[in-house]
Image (spheres, grey):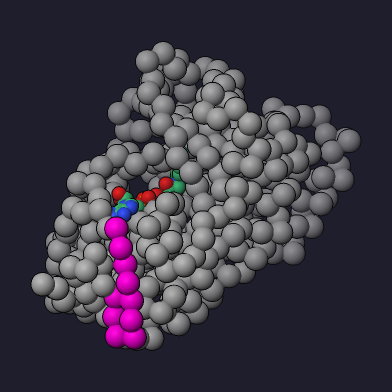
Amino acid sequence: VTTDWDLIVVGAGPAGSAAAIAALTERPGARVLLLDRAPLGRDKVCGDGIAPHTVAALEALGVRAVEPPEVVPTVRLSAPGGGSSSAATGDPGYVVPRAQFDERLARAAIERGAVFEERRVASVAQDAEGVSVDGRDRAPALIAADGANSVVRRAIGQGHNSKRALAVAVRGYAPTPAGMPRELEIRWDSRRSGGLCYAWSFPTAEGTSNVGYGMSSAALTNGRAELEQRMRLLLAEFDFDGVALSGHTLPLSIDRPKPAVGRVLLTGDAASLINPLTGEGIYSAVASGIMAGRAAATDAAGAGARYGRELAAAFGRQHRQLKLVYPLVDSRAVLDAVIRACNADRGTFDRLLDVGLGESAFRMRDMATLAKFLARRGLAVN
Ligand SMILES: Cc1cc2nc3c(=O)[nH]c(=O)nc-3n(C[C@H](O)[C@H](O)[C@H](O)COP(=O)(O)OP(=O)(O)OC[C@H]3O[C@@H](n4cnc5c(N)ncnc54)[C@H](O)[C@@H]3O)c2cc1C
């Protein structure tokens, strides 16, 4: 027996829940099935940093997914050469353990009318009229939001990212050292790894900090031990005794699958939308989920084409640009120059965060500023 739905969403992380909420906002009363292999409230290996862009996108849908004590209004970037730059962001960021953040979003989707079912999806098949899941459920469109190791992505014939376009990271919760300022801190590493390479400490509302270290998979030679060793080195003031660390991969946006094949739309990590400069993936998950949910609820047959156009309009310029810029984040000289530029010009700091956390791209003027500070490096004091 097959159950018919208006829309099936696989995965109840930020991308999937946002897709269900957007679909039900567009078409109240639609029959939306939201499937996840884990129960509500599952943990997710993440830095837990929620960008202001994410908060705004969810608020536009009438969903408040953060609480006042979780606010962290300042961002600090620390360069390998020792320089650092910090500033309060225009709208603040938040740190919300993903077990809570994702549950809040999934519950908002259920409140809007989505039917949640705990189930691991094994097979997806589509024909000209619709998509079937495990031979049990069927809908005119399906949204894949099943994360970095997406089963749906494989089922529609799209391969996974190359090692160069994957990052890998570990994280745990350590007590926040006394007197440490309440900041979202990123400490770039000095070693060359062909791309993303930094430690972070993001304070939760409960006296702990989410601490971790991430780098390009292609450069990892000694597995988890290497990540943990660099993390301890860069976050020397933290006490890691008894801190349980877990790891996961990040599919970076420098290598992406087609956003849609037929009536299946890929969103979030399943679509490799993680920002390669920062590892931010929650905003792009929510933003892509919203676009896909709206498109699927409006016209299932045309949803893939519309979603592809809207995703390209929002992120296309950033995706093309960061693919070119990505190798530069491997250069210590560039990272040091970025910090000097941020300290000299608040506009540069704001622009960097907007590109790193949202859907903006750099302008020519930003590149010229960076070139100026790179050229001046011989004269710099720090
Ligand atoms: C260590 C680390 C730190 C990070 N830090 C940050 C950060 O601070 N800020 C930030 O913005 N981003 C961060 N990211 C990236 C962020 O975690 C992801 O980009 C984000 O979770 C993507 O959301 P999603 O909804 O696409 O996928 P996910 O959140 O992974 O959700 C996918 C869901 O699909 C379910 N699922 C999977 N397979 C199946 C199946 N076969 N059947 C049914 N359900 C299935 C899973 O149970 C899961 O609930 C970090 C990533 C890592 C690894």
**Residue 258, position in %: x, y?**
51, 70
* Residue positioned most to the left: 1
Asked if the stretch drawn in magenta spans residue 125, the answer is yes
Q: How many marks?
A: 0
**Residue 14, position in %: x, y?**
34, 55
Regarding residue 320, the answer to whether it shows in the image is yes
- Residue 350 drawn above or below residue 85: below
Residue at 54% x, 73% y: name it: 312
- Residue 161 drawn above or below residue 206: below
- Position of the N terminus, as image quadrant, is bottom left
- Position of the C terminus, as image quadrant, is top right
Query: Could you say which is closer to the camera, residue 350 or residue 223?
Result: 223
Residue at 60% x, 27% y: name it: 222
Q: Main secondary structure of the magenta part?
A: loop
Query: Could you say which is closer to the camera, residue 64 or residue 315?
Result: 315
Asked if residue 267 lies left or right of residue 29, the reply is: right
**Residue 165, position in %: x, y?**
60, 52
Asked if residue 286 lies left or right of residue 5, the reply is: right
**Residue 315, position in %: x, y?**
54, 67
Residue at 47% x, 70% y: name it: 259
Regarding residue 295, the answer to whether it shows in the image is no
Residue at 25% x, 53% y: name it: 120
- Residue 115 drawn above or below residue 235: below
Query: Could you say which is closer to the camera, residue 185 or residue 307?
Result: 307
In magenta, the rendered stretch is 122-131
